[in-house]
Image (cartoon, rainbow, N blue to C red):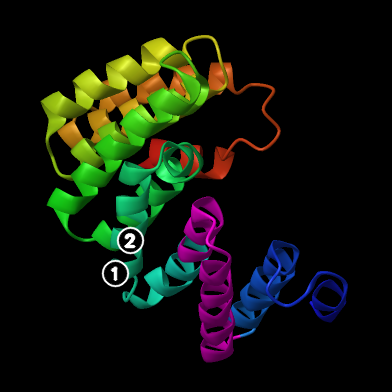
Amino acid sequence: LRIAEAAFGAHAQESAYPRRTLASELAAAGDWHAADALLDEDLSRTEARGDVREVAGAVYALANHRVREGNAEPLVARLRESTKADARVRRDFELLLTHLESALGAGDPVREEAAAKATVDAMRRAVGPRHPDYAIAVLQLGAFYTRTERFEEAARTLAIAREVAAGSETEGWVLRALADLEEARGRHADALAYLDAVERIWKHKYDAPRAELEAQRER
């Protein structure tokens, strides 16, 4: 950080990345307040430069830090307004915003569902409706419906995810979510059939969660 500030100046954009990296390391080491102060300072310096995308980046960095403490609402609201007002900010930060919304909505089913749907919409705009990442976003919405016992909606949503993911490694994750759904419904034979399909797809996947799959079979 000192090298960047000496080379470019403390208020330069080039100093923002090392400042945010240092803040992340301070937070990981448990010095939460020092990290917060550094990111707050970073936001102030970025605001002084006046570039809306740079400001959005600083707002996101501070919001992502504060979301763990539950006091990021004003920053998330500010980033949300920026994505509505500026197409460049929307392109760069729409998906990141949905991740913040998901974190803030944890434990509130209404907010969780809204955030999951927003992620699906944002991912479709970012990568298109046939991309495996879009399938993962749809899968996560389906998994939410399973957790909240909205089984018919879960089945319809996961069917979409499966169609998009067909033939890719991602299909294994969708089939596993379908196994979770059938287990929640009490349809254990169907759940086992999906787990068998997962094993076939992931036969050569070195990092497949085989211990978790076996534990699910035992249940």
Question: What's the residue type where badge 2 is placed?
Answer: Arg
State the residue at coordinates (45%, 48%). 96
Q: Residues within 10 Å of mark 2 (few under 14, many from 20)?
A: some
Distance, label 1 to label 2, CA atoms, is 6 Å
Q: Residues within 10 Å of mark 1 (few under 14, many from 20)?
A: few
State the residue at coordinates (12%, 24%). 152
SS at circle 2 = helix
Quickly name the residue at label 2: 78
Q: Quadrant of residue 130?
A: top left
Span colored in magenta: 30-59
State the quadrant of the C terminus: top left
Quickly name the residue at label 1: 74
Q: Quadrant of residue 7?
A: bottom right
State the residue at coordinates (47%, 60%). 60
In this rendering, does residue 102 appear at all?
no
Disc 1 and disc 2 in contact, CB within 8 angstroms:
yes
Question: What's the residue type where badge 1 is placed?
Answer: Pro
Q: Residue 42, position in %: x, y?
A: 58, 75
Q: Which mark is residue 52?
A: none
Residue 56 among those drawn in magenta? yes
